[in-house]
Image (tube, grey):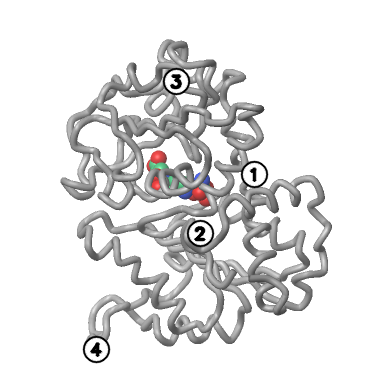
Amino acid sequence: MKHFLSVQSCQPKDLVQQALQLKAQPWAYESLGKRKTLGLLFLNPSLRTRLSTQKAAAQLGLNTMVMNLSQDGWNLELGNGMVMDQGASEHVKEAAQVMGQYCDIVGIRCFPGLQDASEDYRDELIGQFIEYSGRPVISLESCTRHPLQSLADMMTIEECRGTNPKPKVVLSWAPHAKPLPQAVANSFVEWATAFDCDLTITHPKGYELAGEFSSLAPVCYNQDQAFENADFIYCKNWSSYTSYGKIIGNHRDWMITLDKMKRTNQAKFMHCLPIRRNLVAADDVLDSNQSVVIQQAHNRIFAAQAVLKNILETQQGVGS
Ligand SMILES: NCCC[C@H](NC(=O)CCC(=O)O)C(=O)O
Ligand SMILES: NC(=O)OP(=O)(O)O
């Protein structure tokens, strides 16, 4: 594996199996990353991604440097040929090349601005780090995707599906107070459709995902109907793609409740976290034994570890 940016960066089923093996034997490769450095750049807040990736790196013997770029770093300019007389102090060309000197692998978290769809969907910052750092780059959630989350989600589905050959998985939009990125939902659709799942997307009209993602699974505008016989409910808010970055209507009645969960086949409840209780999902859903949100967060360690292991093996000429 060279970079890890989306489901297309890997053999997803194989990677899930590797991650599950690492969960069983976390220290099996504890010297693989010896004397190598992982640099993690955060332009946005994080609890899980930051800590699970650091823990994964430690279990591979990697040294980690973390930088909260938005608080502690210089504002970066991405544009070519810009006269830098505004807020940005440093160009990504220098910043990425410098990171490439300090690190063997670079991870970047960067949320979209939610103002301009074409700008966000170019995912320029990650692209520039690939170009200028000369190092393998891992997406820690980009403007368009969150592949480490999706990998952990697929591990969780694998662990919970039992002998069900094709579980019904429902990605359900839920309300929120703030306009949020589409990245988690986009990525989940891409990954779930690469596995043996019967995926349905449900959301109010106006919340259609970008065509490259919405075209991968049927959309049902009736949440109650979508929940019938579901084995997994994957809940997430996202802002509108068509009215880009906007919240349209309030749709508070789309919150996940125990009554709605009763329509399902005792479905497991999934969410990437952080989650706003009693807005996105009710307390009694999150506190029920159907909720697997903590298991998902636990699996983030081994998802990151599997990705780092593959990149390190490629650097040593033993992987693909
Ligand atoms: N990394 C996982 C999700 C991150 C982000 N959630 C948030 O920003 C929630 C913020 C809040 O609830 O204030 C999202 O939806 O993409
Ligand atoms: N799910 C997830 O990525 O959480 P953080 O934003 O806390 O990293």
Instruction: Count neighbours of disc 2 (C-alpha within 10 A) and say few if under 14, some if 14 to 19, many if 20 or more.
Output: many
The residues bearing labels 2 and 3 have C-alpha atoms spaced at a distance of: 28 Å
Vertical side of 57 occupied by 215: above or below = above
Q: Nearer the viewer, residue 97 or 7?
A: 7
Vertical side of 215 occupied by 268: above or below = above
**In the drawing, what numbered circle is on residue 140?**
2
Residue at position x 52%, y 48% in the image: 149
The residues bearing labels 2 and 4 have C-alpha atoms spaced at a distance of: 28 Å
The residues bearing labels 3 and 1 have C-alpha atoms spaced at a distance of: 23 Å
Instruction: Count neighbours of disc 4 (C-alpha within 10 A) and say few if under 14, some if 14 to 19, many if 20 or more.
Output: few
Q: Amino acid at mark 2?
A: Leu
What residue is disc 1 on?
A: 299
> Would you say the beta carbon of the disc 4 residue lies within 8 angstroms of ligand 1?
no
Q: Amino acid at mark 4?
A: Gly
Q: Position of residue 155 (x, y in %)?
A: 62, 42
> Would you say the beta carbon of the disc 2 residue lies within 8 angstroms of ligand 2?
yes
Q: Earlier in the sequence, mark 3 or mark 1?
A: 3
Q: Secondary structure at mark 2?
A: loop
Residue at position x 81%, y 50% in the image: 25
**Comparing labels 1 and 4, the label whose residue is closer to the camera:** 1
Q: Amino acid at mark 3?
A: Ala
Q: Earlier in the sequence, mark 2 or mark 1?
A: 2
**Comparing labels 3 and 1, the label whose residue is closer to the camera:** 1
What residue is disc 3 on?
A: 282
Q: Secondary structure at mark 4?
A: loop
Instruction: Count neighbours of disc 1 (C-alpha within 10 A) and say few if under 14, some if 14 to 19, many if 20 or more.
Output: many
What residue is disc 4 on?
A: 81
- Along the horizontal axis of the image, is 56 left or right of 272? right
